[in-house]
Amino acid sequence: MEWQDKTEYYTIVTNEQLDTIVPDMVVEFMSYDKSKTHTLRSACFPFPQELEDGTFLISIQLSNTAHYSNKCVKSFISQSGFDLAVQFYGIENIFTSLEGLEFKETLT
């Protein structure tokens, strides 16, 4: 898979991975507040969606620093953002199609 403009990319992570602290190089790249601790759960966009097997679907694009608290982004992921995400998730774990995913049903 190669980066393409105006494309949404996803990956699947575990609950434990969601609680990992985002590395300094990512905090720097995203221009996040360096005085705070950021976890993947707090930075991911949108909110993690639980799958039937207990893992979570997230976008590889992190929340924009200006919209961190409400988990928004300003545009599609850039080539450099994609390349950074590949370092963490592995290219084989990044995909664009949600076909075949089974989401855990939640009570509303």
Image (cartoon, grey):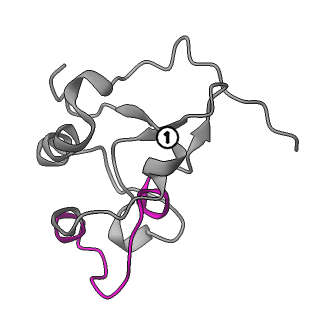
Placement of 64 over or under 100, stated as above or below? below
Name the spot of residue 103 as percent of width and height, x first: 66, 26
Q: Say which element carries label 1.
A: loop
Seen in the picture, residue 70 relative to 77 is either above or below; the reply is below
Q: Which residue is mark 1?
A: 14
Q: Number of numbered discs present? A: 1
The extreme right residue here reads 108
Q: Tell me the magenta residue range.
A: 27-44
In reply to whether residue 49 is colored magenta, the answer given is: no
Residue 61 in view, yes or no: yes
Q: Residue furthest bottom?
A: 35
Q: Residue at the far top: name it.
A: 100
Is 69 in front, or is 7?
69
Binning the other alpha carbons within 10 Å of mark 1 as few (below 14), some (14 to 19) or many (20 upward) gives: few
Front one among 6 and 79 = 79
Q: Amino acid at mark 1?
A: Thr
Up the image or down, 35 lies above or below 105; here it is below
- Judge by depth and name the residue closer to the eye, 55 or 72: 55
**Is residue 45 in sight in this rendering?**
no
Left or right? Give the position of 93 relative to 43: left
Q: Residue at x 19, y 41 (%)?
A: 82
> In the rendered image, which quarter contains the N terminus?
top left
Residue at figure coordinates x 11%, y 47% from the top left:
80
